[in-house]
């Protein structure tokens, strides 16, 4: 049980919590909230595994993911209101999540023997599609399409990872530096309200 | 051609009919209604097979599923209005459908060598995701997330099946008892308007 | 690099452009527009490959698809407004796209050893599901379900292809004739405002 695995579980917890809270905001029942939490946490990785042909998908081999999601469900129900006060902590966990999901998705794709550019796309897919599915299920226009430098932070982190590995950096170092990259970009983007809504000539 | 296969076809017919009727309510054309009927009937099983890696997916090996959906499409067009009078019968068929889909999805997942808990999740996925996709395609918040003890009836039925099999019950007996469990829970839930909308402290 | 490959790239370009323009109409940002363009262009083929078990999916082996989509993204941003003037040309490209996607999806499915009827369904899926996903992501009721003889043109083209191949027609001839079939039906459908909204007895 290494530190990457722990960060992965932290990310799953943060994503599941975000899914459950969104579901509760939309008055979903217990089952609906569980489903949305599950899909938010594991939907991106599932989509990746299905597309690169690594099936049965990863979470089917490790029930710890299920317990983590169950914990997120129970805690959200019990402390729903008060969790709002911890939005800042949630943001930290969530950003750890997109960082680690990007690197893990990227590596898993490289392991199948696919190109780095494809691995980068699959890394970002792992990180962001859970949230896209959450928004689709709750009938909102996916948030990511309108706000925040969310996916671009993942692209930057993934690129840093690929470059460091290309120059033979140690795996742990590459992972940490990439995650810090994701974190800083996302933090700055929110802090200074960055956006990539370019002025368009229409 | 055993009785499980016949029940499976009955379930596909009921699900396809529900999809086509929902599509017609939303003024979809012939093609749209066919697509929604198809996805409602076979979407859950397709998602399961893709995730557990049993591809090409099951319905590609048996054209009877296609004829069954075609029959549901034609009958819904011809007798659309009058079918409403048979809502009670449709409910029976539909519940047979979720029962048999749960058991079949569960078994197919066990056959791949995955854990019973994963098999249970895949059984419920088989039973309910066709309906979720139907609602997404017609731009409604998925019904299952807001009403009825639908998925929980599947969870109960699947659990009963696993327990009976664990204690070496005959396959046919386990299947019948599980389906009856699904049926009774769903019937009682609708009859007495059960819900799992827990009071939440927010 | 044969002519079918070139037509395929033309189709991807047309689909990606349609996706990006729809995204921009909905005020999506750069990332969102890129994602919607990508999914519109490659979503149908991805769904097909995942269902028939040909994974990693096709586009992962050819980065030219990615460059094509990038080109569509840049051109749509630069010339968004003026592209409207070329709607007629876009229609031509788009129809080339659905024609070639139908035939390619059909053949890829036959190559896996599946039935012609399944191959036909997968051909149409390849052609139309990119558009369905585009509409879902932008929270519109999928256009195809309400308008135009879009899918039926693909069904007709695919059927012509299967018949010609059954009677040993040359592959190039079969492909051209099928594509012309798709084109003519779609052109006539739009020209004369055909629809398959049957009068229904409800």
Image (cartoon, coloured by chain):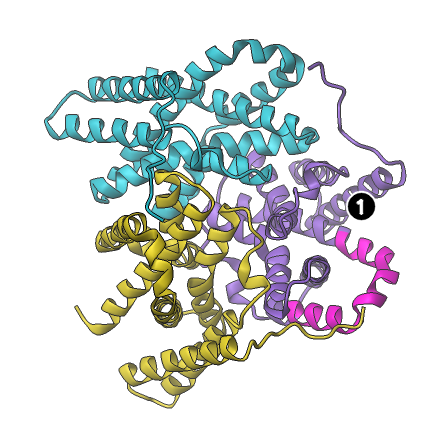
Chain colours: A yellow, B cyan, C purple
Residue lying at 48% horizontally and 75% vertically, measured from the top left: A153
The x and y percentages for residue A2 are 19, 72
Q: Nearer the viewer, residue C142 or A95?
A: A95
- The residue segment tinted magenta is C68-94
Q: Can you identify the residue that label 1 sits on? A: C183
Which quarter of the picture shows residue B191?
top left
Residue lying at 54% horizontally and 40% vertically, measured from the top left: B136
The x and y percentages for residue A123 are 43, 68
Magenta region, main secondary structure: helix
Residue B72 shown left or right of residue A15 in the figure: right
Residue A97 shown left or right of residue C151 in the figure: left
Task: Label 1: state its secondary structure.
Answer: helix
Within the magenta stretch, is there residue C72?
A: yes
Residue A127 shown left or right of residue C72 in the figure: left
Which quarter of the picture shows residue A172?
bottom left
Q: Residues within 10 Å of mark 1 (few under 14, many from 20)?
A: many
Q: Nearer the viewer, residue C114 or A85?
A: A85
With respect to residue A127, does A76 lie above or below?
above
Which quarter of the picture shows residue A162?
bottom left
The x and y percentages for residue B45 are 41, 36
Quarter of the image for the C terminus of chain C: give it.
Answer: top right
């Amino acid at each position: 049980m290494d530190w990457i695995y722990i960060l992965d579980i932290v990310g799953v917890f943060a994503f599941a919590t975000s899914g459950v809270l969104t579901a509760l905001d939309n008055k979903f029942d217990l089952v609906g909230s569980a489903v949305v939490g599950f899909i938010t946490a594991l939907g991106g990785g599932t989509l990746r595994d299905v597309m690169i042909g690594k099936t049965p998908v990863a979470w089917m081999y490790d029930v710890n993911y299920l317990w983590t999601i169950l914990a997120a469900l129970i805690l959200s129900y019990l402390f729903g209101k008060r969790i709002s006060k911890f939005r800042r902590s949630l943001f930290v966990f969530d950003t750890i999540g997109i960082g680690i999901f990007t690197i893990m998705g990227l590596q898993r794709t490289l392991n199948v023997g696919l190109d780095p550019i494809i691995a980068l796309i699959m890394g970002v897919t792992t990180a962001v599609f859970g949230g896209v599915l959450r928004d689709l299920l709750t009938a909102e226009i996916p948030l990511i399409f309108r706000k925040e430098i969310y996916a671009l932070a993942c692209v930057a982190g993934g690129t840093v990872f690929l470059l460091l590995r290309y120059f033979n950096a140690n795996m742990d170092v590459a992972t940490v530096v990439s995650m810090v990259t994701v974190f800083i970009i996302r933090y700055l983007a929110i802090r200074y309200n960055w956006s990539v809504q370019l002025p368009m000539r229409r």
